[in-house]
Image: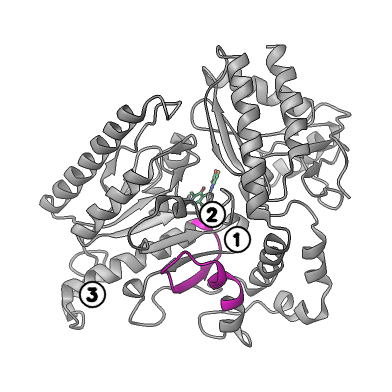
């Protein structure tokens, strides 16, 4: 069972972590390794490092743990003889799916599909889900341009040499401060940190400005609506310019909230306007819910809060869904087999575990709990912001996603380190934001521990 509170015995990283890091560094670069973890003895919302430090984990493996560590319902899946085969025999899913795979997908991933998205493709991770979702959008765009005819011999010949018309000059519009993954296509849509992109050739695709909201929202309603309009006008301009430059936009990609870029929210009106622009121009809308999905905001998908008139064409997921993949509308469905494809095309064993996770979310009403705990967490951030206005600003959040800004990276990093030495592990994002990414099982008692330690370090700053 979970401990009642954190215990910190050594500096973090402690001596054992430091020794293990030295060993691992002989094999690979370990610059960003923070500490080594004793996963056998991490429980629920508490992570235990190899030096015996037990921390309340509010970052949860970059927001990828739905139920925390060693949840009994997940351990049961692993002990169930009926599941051995799923773990022992990883299939090339695109060609040799396992028994009743459609049934498994229907009972799991499709049971939580965003409204109107009836097609589903599993993949390994977030980036490869984005990569293949983009392919779906490009193929749909070219299918429409061909008007149903087959590709020409010239297209077939030229595509093998990376040249038009087989490799068409199409583009994807993304947003400044976005993050969509580290593979080359997803990286061309990612603009949040230089060390993600440096040294890698990129597509010269349009990059628009994502709204910068002023907080508190209720005080700056007019300014924020004007900001939405300004950004949407820029999106239209970029689409027009791309068309004139001979590389029309086939897809607009956006996170429903920019996470790596600094927990940057935008209004439902912005996304409704974005969908209007896409539909007006025959452009697919890809919403990347890798970090915001799987119940993290109290709704299963963040974009549910947007009340979009129609379903987005493509929705990518990974992290807390335990498998990567994307949902898509029928018009995005490939008409030829083997074109959205790779060896594994996902992993059924992860879907088997996800079935247990979805069961716990339902049985324990974790969406409602995430909303309640998230509101309670927001109150603790707002209270701290009120007490320390010189240190904190723009407190914001939704369910298990929360963030607050510091005046600069240095004071933020210093506070995060001191918070960890008091037994609370949090994340960072953007240039100077602290971010929280809890499990879906977080309770008010955990928020009390966070608030107590957070105020202690703020008081001593
Ligand atoms: C909105 C969104 N889209 C795609 C991705 C890529 O997912 P993975 O390839 O990491 O599974 C992510 C992954 N998040 C992430 C956080 S830090 C990080 C990194 O590579 O440093 C990656 C995401 O947040």
Residue 194: x and y in percent read 44, 35
State the SS at label 1: helix
Give coordinates of residue 114: x percent, y percent.
Answer: 47, 64
Asked if the stretch drawn in magenta spans residue 309, the answer is: no
Residue receiving disc 3 = 143
Q: Residue at the spot x=68%, y=54% of the render?
A: 366
Residue at (61%, 76%) from the top-left corner? 107
Q: Residue furthest bottom?
A: 99
Mark 3: which secondary structure?
helix
Q: Using the numbered discs, state the Cα–Cα distance from disc 1 to disc 3 in whole angstroms.
A: 31 Å
Checking the image for residue 321, the label placed there is 1
Left or right of 63 in this view: 308: left
Q: How many marks?
A: 3
> Which residue in the rendered view is the most extreme toward the left?
244
Near mark 3 (Cα within 10 A), the count class, few <14, some 14-19 or many ≥20, is some
Q: Which mark is residue 387?
A: none
- On the question of residue 171 being in view, the answer is no
Q: Nearer the viewer, mark 3 or mark 2?
A: 2
Q: Nearer the viewer, residue 230 or 305?
A: 305
Tell me if 19 is positioned left or right of 152 in this view: right
Q: Earlier in the sequence, mark 1 or mark 3?
A: 3
Q: Quadrant of the C terminus?
A: top right
- Asked whether residue 18 is in view, the answer is yes
Question: In the image, which residues are magenta?
Answer: 106-126
Magenta-drawn stretch contains 119: yes
Give me the residue at 42% from left, 29% from top.
218
Q: Position of residue 221 (x, y in %)?
A: 35, 30
Q: Which residue is mark 2?
A: 293
CA distance separating discs 1 and 2: 8 Å
């Amino acid at each position: 069972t979970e401990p009642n509170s954190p215990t910190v015995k050594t500096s973090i990283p402690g001596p054992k972590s430091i020794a293990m890091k030295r060993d691992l560094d002989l094999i690979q670069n370990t610059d960003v390794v923070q500490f080594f973890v004793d996963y056998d003895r991490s429980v629920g919302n508490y992570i235990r490092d190899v030096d015996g430090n037990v921390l309340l984990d509010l970052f949860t493996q970059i927001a990828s743990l739905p139920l925390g560590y060693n949840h009994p319902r997940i351990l049961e899946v692993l002990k169930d003889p009926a599941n051995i085969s799923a773990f022992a025999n990883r299939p090339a899913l695109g060609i040799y799916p396992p028994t009743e795979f459609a049934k498994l997908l229907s009972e799991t991933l499709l049971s939580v599909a965003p409204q109107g998205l009836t097609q589903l493709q599993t993949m390994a991770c977030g980036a490869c889900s984005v990569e293949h979702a983009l392919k779906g959008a490009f193929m749909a765009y070219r299918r429409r341009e061909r008007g149903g005819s087959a590709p020409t011999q010239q297209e077939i010949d030229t595509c093998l040499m990376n040249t038009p018309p087989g490799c068409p000059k199409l583009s994807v519009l993304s947003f400044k401060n976005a993050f969509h993954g580290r593979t080359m296509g997803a990286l061309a849509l990612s603009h949040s940190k230089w060390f993600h992109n440096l040294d890698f050739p990129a597509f010269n695709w349009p990059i628009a400005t994502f709204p910068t909201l002023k907080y508190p929202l209720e005080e700056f309603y007019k300014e924020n609506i004007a900001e939405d309009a300004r950004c949407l006008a820029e999106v239209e301009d970029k689409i027009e310019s791309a068309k004139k430059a001979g590389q029309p936009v086939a897809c607009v990609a956006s996170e429903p909230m920019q996470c790596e870029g600094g927990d940057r929210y935008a209004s439902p009106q912005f996304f409704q306007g974005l969908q209007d622009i896409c539909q007006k121009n025959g452009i697919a809308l890809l919403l990347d819910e890798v970090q915001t999905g799987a119940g993290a905001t109290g709704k299963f998908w963040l974009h549910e809060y947007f009340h979009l008139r129609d379903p987005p064409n493509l929705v990518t997921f990974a992290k807390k869904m335990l498998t990567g993949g994307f949902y898509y509308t029928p018009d995005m469905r490939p008409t030829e087999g083997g074109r959205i494809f790779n060896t594994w095309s996902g992993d059924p064993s992860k879907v088997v575990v996800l079935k247990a996770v979805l069961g716990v979310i339902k049985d324990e009403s974790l969406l409602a709990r995430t909303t309640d705990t998230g509101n309670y967490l927001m109150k603790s951030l707002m209270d701290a912001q009120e007490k320390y206005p010189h240190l904190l600003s723009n407190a914001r959040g939704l369910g298990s996603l929360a963030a607050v800004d510091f005046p600069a990276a240095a004071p933020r990093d210093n506070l995060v380190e001191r918070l960890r030495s008091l037994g609370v592990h949090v994340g960072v994002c953007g240039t100077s934001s602290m971010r929280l990414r809890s499990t879906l099982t977080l309770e008010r008692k955990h928020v009390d521990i966070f608030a107590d330690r957070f105020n202690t370090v703020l008081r001593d700053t």
